[in-house]
Image (cartoon, helix red, strand yellow):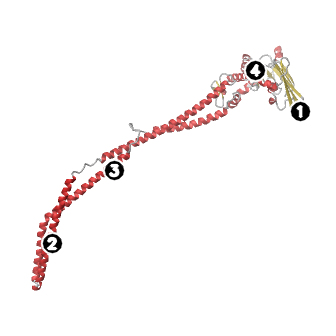
Amino acid sequence: MKILKLSVDNFMKLSAVEITPQGNLVQICGRNAQGKTSVLNAIWVALAGKDACPKVPVRKGAEEARIQLDCGELVITRHFRATEDGGYTTSIAVENADGARFPSPQKMLDTLLGALSFDPLAFSRMKPKEQFDQLRQFVPGVDFEALERQNRGDFERRTEVNRFAKQERAAAQAITVPDGTPETLIDESELLGELTRASDHNADIARRRANREQVRETMETARQVIQRTPAEIVEATKRARAIRDREVTRLKQQIEQLRQQITTVERECDEEIARQTEQLTTQAEAAERSISEIQEKLAAAGELPKEIDVQALQAKIQAARATNAAVAKLLERRKHEKAAEQLEHQADELTAKMEARNADKRAAIAAAQIPVPGIEFGEGLVLLNGVPFEQASDAEQLRASVAIAMALNPKLRVIRIRDGSLLDEDAMRLVGEMADAHDMQVWVERVDSSGKIGFVLEDGHVRKAEAEQEVAA
């Protein structure tokens, strides 16, 4: 359904305008401030209802305004009446081809109205974020901002997790483990216990050896005592007799009174000799008995056991410590590798979440009513054939923008383009070709005072229509 005739009275800057389009490309031309924009606004206001109305819809100096769209199957008429307080009232009537009125006209129009407010030319010149916001409203059920926040958060977490994983991998690779290192630690305590027992064993042998050496020395001393006892007796006798002789000589010189003393000294000397002889004899006999006892003990003790090779045990302990140091390195490397694997698994899970969200988003976009090949949603921007929309050529941008507008208006096959003066001849030809190819009526506003093209507006009126221009040509 298209607009067959547009009639406007006293709406915004329009005084009395009647336009009957010829063909699918409808150009509204004229100088600035002559009412071109009001024509395009009138189409939108007539269809979209009160919410689309401007603050002052009635032309200055008039009391009422009217917009009528003849769409063949339907005739839509919207009236406005200015009020004394500076406001207005509005009403709408929708009739079918037989003149019957619909009881709920705006509700019926809402079923026909697509995205007539979508201006393809304005869209092509929007910033990427504005384009994104403009199109995402046509993908219901997808909260793009929430998805972006979640993906951004997961991306940041994944970046951090990957950084930690790389650190763990680097820490693992920095640990050098000798070849052949076992998986488990050697129990050094058992080897140390064995070393302690061996040391105690060897110390006991050394102590027993020292005791035997001491006994041997004691035996040697006793033998020496036994050997020197007769000579000592003789020597002692000699010394005693020499003393006696000296004393006798001295006492004889003291006359007779000393005879008694000589007799006493001789007796005491003999007693001392006997005592010393008896004592030395007793010591010799005791020494002989001691030697005999010791020899019996030595014979009973047998040979000393062999000493344990402590150096071999110490070498084993050193080897165990070296092995355990290597095992500790291996375990430390395994710990870093396991941590890296866990972090990499977390990163994979975050990637899967982001991919799942993107897949859901792509599925929602694919199901949306924007059947334009090449249009996709990126991270906060619209993509065209896989690249940002703004990087496409002007022709590609225009073609895609017009195609979007056409796709968004499947029932009322009308779209509006403001600032059409920005389009060169090639772009206008492209719009016209697309309008014909898709059987879509395109209303274009252009600043043009030549009077050679389109419907030329001047001071709120149509000064010249397309049909008149064709005749003049």
Q: Tell me the tag on residue 275.
A: 2
Label 1, label 3: how many angstroms apart (C-alpha)? 113 Å
Left or right for 349, reference 328: right
The quadrant in which residue 108 appears is: top right
Mark 3 lies on a secondary structure that is: helix
CB of mark 1 within 8 Å of CB of mark 3?
Answer: no
The quadrant in which residue 328 appears is: top left
Query: Mark 4 highlights which residue?
Result: 411
Query: Mark 1 highlights which residue?
Result: 83
Give the residue type at disc 2: Arg
Residue 398 location, x and y as percent? 70, 23
Quadrant of the image for the N terminus?
top right
Does residue 156 appear anywhere in the picture? yes
Residue 20 location, x and y as percent? 82, 18
Query: Mark 3 highlights which residue?
Result: 196
Label 2, label 1: how many angstroms apart (C-alpha)? 163 Å
Q: Nearer the viewer, mark 4 or mark 2?
A: 2
CB of mark 2 within 8 Å of CB of mark 1?
Answer: no
Label 1, label 4: how many angstroms apart (C-alpha)? 35 Å
Give the residue type at disc 3: Thr
- The mark that comes first in sequence, 2 or 1, is 1
